[in-house]
Structures are given as C-alpha cells and as structure tokens.
Image (spheres, rainbow, N blue to C red):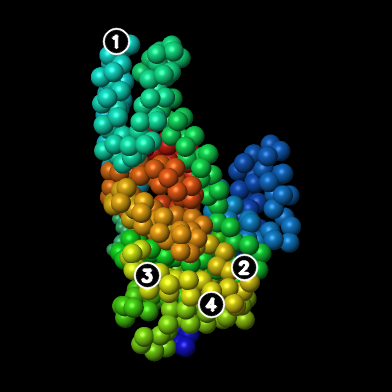
Amino acid sequence: MIMASSSPSASPSAQLSLLSKPLPPRQSVQLLFNVTQSRAGPRGAASSRFRCFAGQTGFFSRLGRLIKEKAKNDVEKIFSGGFSKTRDNLAVIDELLLYWNLADTDRVLDELEEVLLVADFGPKITIRIVEGLREDILAGKLKSGSEIKDALRKSVLEILTSKGSKTELKLGFRKPAVIMIVGVNGGGKTTSLGKLAYRLKNEGAKVLLAAGDTFRAAASDQLEIWAERTGCEIVVAERENAKASSVLSQAVKRGKEERFDIVLCDTSGRLHTNYSLMEELIACKKAVSKVVSGAPNEILQVLDGTTGLNMLPQAREFNDVVGITGLVLTKLDGSARGGCVVSVVDELGIPVKFVGVGEGVEDLQPFDAEAFVNAIFS
Ligand SMILES: Nc1nc2c(ncn2[C@@H]2O[C@H](COP(=O)(O)OP(=O)(O)O)[C@@H](O)[C@H]2O)c(=O)[nH]1
Ligand SMILES: [Mg+2]
C-alpha cells in the first residue's frame, strides 16, 4: 500500500472560512460553533442546541450540525447559481397565476401540471399537488394567485420535510467516521467526495481520502488532485487490480492508527444491474466494518440530476444491496429538472443530504428543504 501524502496545509480558499488561520481540529470546531451561536442571537434555541450536543460524542454531532447550519448562510449562492435553470422553468407559474380567476381554474391547473412534469416532479407528486390545490380553491380556501403559489410552496416543503428531514451527516462516535460514496459511472462521486472533503476540512476535521475506485487507473490520479486541492491525505492502491475492499480497509486502518476524524471512501462506478459489482460493494462495506465497528457511518449515493426520474430505479437497487443513508444529487446547476429532488425523497424516503451545483470546490450544498423551495419558487 502506498500512502501518498499531499500538502498538509489547506488551500488559500480553504482558509476563507470564519477562521483567519488554521487551528487544530477540536479548537477550530469549537470556535466556529461559538460564531454560529452568536449569529443565532441571544435567544434560547441556540444555547440549548449547544448543550444538547456537548456530550462525549460532541465532535461528530457538532460537525454534522455545523455543516447543515452553514447551509442557511449559503442560500444566496443557491439562489444565484445552483437552481437557476429549474427556477427559470418554473417562472411560468408566476405568469399563470398572475391572471388566475376562479372560472379559469381548470386551464391554469392543467398548465401548472405540465410545468411541474417538465421540471421532473414526477406524475405522482404532480397530481397530488395539483389536486390538493384544486380542492382548496374549490373550497374557497385559496382566493388569489399568490395564495395558490404559497400553497404550492408549502405542499412541496411538506413532502420534503415529512419524508427526508434527517439531512445532517450522522457520523457516529468512533474515530474515524467512515463515509462511502457509491453510484453509477460519471454521476459525480469523486467530485462530490472532493467537495465534501473541502467542507469537512474547513470545519476543522482531519480527513483521509481512500481511492477505492480500483477499476480505472486514472481514478486515483483524479482523487489525488482533490487531495492536493483540499490539503487532505490520501491512501491509494499500491498495485494494479488491487481489490477495492482491501484499499478501503487499509485506509480505515490508517485512519484509526493516526487518529483521523473522517475517512472518505471513493468507489468505482457500477451499474445497479451488474450483480458482481454490486457484490463488491457489500465486500467493501464488510471490510470497513471489520476495522471500525459501526462503519461505514454513511453510505451516500450520488445521483446525476440531469437524468431526472431515471435515477429512481438506480437508487432503489443500491439501497436494497447496501442500504443508502443519504443521497447526493449532482449537476443541478446544469439541469432544469430540479423537481426530481422531490420525487426522489418521496419515492425512496431517503434524505437528500447534499446537492451538487457546479464543478468548483465550493459547489456542494448541504441540502436544506426550505432553501431549496425558496430557490426554485423565488
Ligand atoms: N456541472 C456540474 N458538473 C459536475 C457536478 N458534479 C460532478 N460534475 C462533473 O461530472 C463529471 C463526472 O464526475 P466524477 O466525479 O468524475 O464522476 P464519478 O465517475 O461518479 O466519480 C466531471 O466532469 C465533473 O466535473 C456538478 O454538481 N455540476
Ligand atoms: Mg470517480
């Protein structure tokens, strides 16, 4: 096993966090948390949140929480870039509702249905939303275009929060926490892993990358670039045709010995229909759990947002085989089909934990249902 080491210092942009200079992991997390607390104002909610997470398992809870909290500060970015195509697509709704009157209800709702389908909300959800609106309009509960729009936003938010509300990373309490990234080829696994490493590192975690994509020679080179970019260490296979499970196992062993906080495991892309490759994922999961009990703490499946509803069978199959704890929906910047986020959560009941909104190091947003709804229906 070659343990390639990258530069230990964070890239200049990595230091653009709330800290002016890098601090040791524990200290920086604590410091950042205090900043979050003071931003939240003097009200009780923030201080009780602090007490609640200050136990022995505090580090990982705080980390998962912090990353989520900070998403709220990133909302503007999602507005300005991430979901712009979806938003443009849904902007027709405003025009539709501007001239709405009761007599016109059927035509307006038919058109609304079409707009939602084009944005990939999926037939089931689209019908549920539109019929819910029709009922409320006919019952006299919604009396204007803006009330209808508010009701539409509320129903989307309700779907997202009732089925997929646990969007924080759950990292357990043993070090290192292990996160495995899985999915089909080209979906954005390696890129998302790199962006996640950047976020975690910025929050003060000591992160180790594991190049578990042993099928393609170029795959570990790609991950090494991310290791350099984010200032993280990396473990790569020492020989060709190494088993992915043994690379991941070695990485987690090193993570344990050297007190890393988190090991991020990349894996090869595989079609959900390829049985032997899916078996390999099970082997990876087992190998990792032998080193640290309870690991992997998260198995995140990366889904390509541009494939829209085609991602559903893929996600179901991966979930059946390895048990997916969260989804990462990528390439939502390039797609007008952001509504698929809603169908995926509703159909699978698996929370979307992150969304990819670009190729840059900062283009991975922790998923926040309210911010998402605001972004697409602004
Ligand atoms: N626009 C955009 N491109 C992305 C995003 N995530 C990944 N990509 C691109 O998708 C391609 C495949 O990504 P990669 O991480 O290699 O996929 P993998 O095969 O699943 O590991 C690369 O060109 C990435 O830059 C995203 O959120 N937005
Ligand atoms: Mg890859």
In x, y percent, where is residue 203? 56, 60
Secondary structure beneath label 4: helix
Q: Is residue 9 left or right of residue 24?
A: left
> Residue 134, located in which quarter of the rendered image?
top left
Dot 3 or dot 1, earlier in sequence: 1
What residue did someone put label 4 on?
287
Do residues under tags 2 and 4 come within 8 Å of each other at their CB atoms? no
Q: Is residue 312 above or below residue 141?
A: below
Residue 199: image tag: none
> Residue 58, located in which quarter of the rendered image?
bottom right
What residue did someone put label 3 on?
275
The one nearer the camera, 109 or 177, is: 109
> Is the residue marked by circle 4 packed among few (<14), some (14-19), or many (20+) residues within 10 Å?
many
- Which amino acid type is marked by label 2? Gly
- Which amino acid type is marked by label 3? Tyr
> What distance separates the C-alpha of mark 1 from that of mark 4?
64 Å
Dot 4 or dot 3, earlier in sequence: 3
| Residue drawn at the location 53% of the way across and 77% of the way down | 287
- Which amino acid type is marked by label 1? Ala
Residue 103: image tag: 1
> What distance separates the C-alpha of mark 2 from that of mark 4?
12 Å
Q: Is residue 108 above or below residue 39?
A: above
Dot 1 or dot 2, earlier in sequence: 1
